[in-house]
């Protein structure tokens, strides 16, 4: 069953509406602050899985809008990045980056150790580590091809995609429960009552903290913002093509984000700041639709077909993420409300992807209050620095004698 592009857009919109209804109707989803696109997307993925397993019918969606939506989201992240604010949050950003890089190393150590314990190629440990989890589908597929071509590892790309799929699902599920657990520790330090966390007294919340808030804008501001996003996408794609195959190669979305940062801060210098509310509107719509498409198109039967060693590695990685988030990320980032939101975001991109991290944080802040610091730090680390750090980490691990 082939669903064309407009049909796919209709289904994605319905997935978001179903997610809203589920979160409103099911108390446990609200209690564990599960993001609405995740709730609706998993239901859609289960329906597709049921059709595949019992009706022997595969639903194939036209996902040609998925990449542009993801890149538009990252463009709005860049347009929302104020370098003056980033400078102010610099020490926290550096500390959070150190915490993130340490997890990359632990993920690979754990994956390799379990792969060797099962007697399988340790490269599967890397695939079930930071390659596919922190790296996501794009990085996983790229390294899977390298492992097949240069190391002779069969089915590496398929395993990488399956691992990334597992991570995307678990990253969206774990952030809320971990945050709920940590909120019990800080008690009355809820975001809405904590001056340092933003709180209700802040007149202009940052763009992505209130996805359900009405964003007052004008057609002119909307068109101007759409133009900036289009420029970010076009220049970012061109830049990505220029550095492809070099030591500086980065995913296209990172280049798009970088161009967005330059545009926003360049316009601010000449007294023409971007329209914050229009950025928020387009960014949140792009994020929601991208997540809905990403989750409803998951091939859950690929997860069911994972070999026992790889599935065990992924289960262990999930446990590592929970333990690390609670005992390392939360404490290292200050053990306060900002740390709770940062930790929820870390669960999202530590196992899944940046959009999942933002959705996790939105679900937490919608319930407990703003956290400007988290929305300042997480997007830059998760969407920019982690790809560079992960590439270096993977290359260093491949220098180990066990891979030669």
Image (cartoon, rainbow, N blue to C red):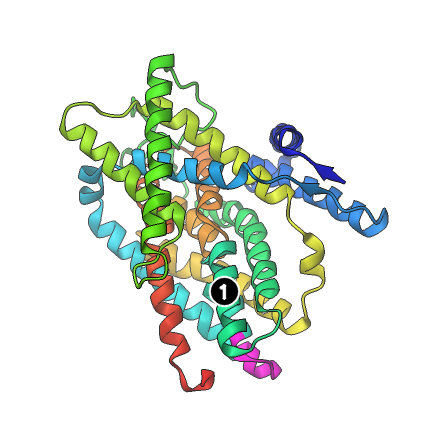
Which quarter of the figure is the N terminus placed in? top right
Q: Which residues are magenta?
A: 114-123
Outermost residue toward the right in this view: 55
Residue 85: x %, y % from top left: 21, 38
Looking at the rendered structure, the secondary structure element under dot 1 is: helix
* Residue on which the image places disc 1: 320
The quadrant in which residue 256 appears is top left
Question: 57 left or right of 304?
Answer: right
Residue 98: x %, y % from top left: 30, 61
Is residue 111 shown to the viewer in this render? no
Residue 14: x %, y % from top left: 65, 29
In this view, the residue in front, 337 or 164, is 164
Q: Is the residue 329 above or below the residue 213 in the image?
A: below
The quadrant in which residue 274 appears is top left
Which quarter of the figure is the C terminus placed in? bottom left
Residue 131: x %, y % from top left: 47, 64
Question: 303 left or right of 266?
Answer: right
Residue in the picture at 19% in, 33% down: 266
Is residue 169 shown to the viewer in this render? yes
Q: Is the residue 180 above or below the residue 395 in the image?
A: above
Residue in the picture at 48% in, 65% down: 143
Question: 401 left or right of 373?
Answer: right
Tell me, yes or no, whether the highlighted magenta stretch contains residue 360.
Answer: no
Prevailing secondary structure of the magenta residues: helix
Residue in the picture at 56% in, 80% down: 121
């Amino acid at each position: 069953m082939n669903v064309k592009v407009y049909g796919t857009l209709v289904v994605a919109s319905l997935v978001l509406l179903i997610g809203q209804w589920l979160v409103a109707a099911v108390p446990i989803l609200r209690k564990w602050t599960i993001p609405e696109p995740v709730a609706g997307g998993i239901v859609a993925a289960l329906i597709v899985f049921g059709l595949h397993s019992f009706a022997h019918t595969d639903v194939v969606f036209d996902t040609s809008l998925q990449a542009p939506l993801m890149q538009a989201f990252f463009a709005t992240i860049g347009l929302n990045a104020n370098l003056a604010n980033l400078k102010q949050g610099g020490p926290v950003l550096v500390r959070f980056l150190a915490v993130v890089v340490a997890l990359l190393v632990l993920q690979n150590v754990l994956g390799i150790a379990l792969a060797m314990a099962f007697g399988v190629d340790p490269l599967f440990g890397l695939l079930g580590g930071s390659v596919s989890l922190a790296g996501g589908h794009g990085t996983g597929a790229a390294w899977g091809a390298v492992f097949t071509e240069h190391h002779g590892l069969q089915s590496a790309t398929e395993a990488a995609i399956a691992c990334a799929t597992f991570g995307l699902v678990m990253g969206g599920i774990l952030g809320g429960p971990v945050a709920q657990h940590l909120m019990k520790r800080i008690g009355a330090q809820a975001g809405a009552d904590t001056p340092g966390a933003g709180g209700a007294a802040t007149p202009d919340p940052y763009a992505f903290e209130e996805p359900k808030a009405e964003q007052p804008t004008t057609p002119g501001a909307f068109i101007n913002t759409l133009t900036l996003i289009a420029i970010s996408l076009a220049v970012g794609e061109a830049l990505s093509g220029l550095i492809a195959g070099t030591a500086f190669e980065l995913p296209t979305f990172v280049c798009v984000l970088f161009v967005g940062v330059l545009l926003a801060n360049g316009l601010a210098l000449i007294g023409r700041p971007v329209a914050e509310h229009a950025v928020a509107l387009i960014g949140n719509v792009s994020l929601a639709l991208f997540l809905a498409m990403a989750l409803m198109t998951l091939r859950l039967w690929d997860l069911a077909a994972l070999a026992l060693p790889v599935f065990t590695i992924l289960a262990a990685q999930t446990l590592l993420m929970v333990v690390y988030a609670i005992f390392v990320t939360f404490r290292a980032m200050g053990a306060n409300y900002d740390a709770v939101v940062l930790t929820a975001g870390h669960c999202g991109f530590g196992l899944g992807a940046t959009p999942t991290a933002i959705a996790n944080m939105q679900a937490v802040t919608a319930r407990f209050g703003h956290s400007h610091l988290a929305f300042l730090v997480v997007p830059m680390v998760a969407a920019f620095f982690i790809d560079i750090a992960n590439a270096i980490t993977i290359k260093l691990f491949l220098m180990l004698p066990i891979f030669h």
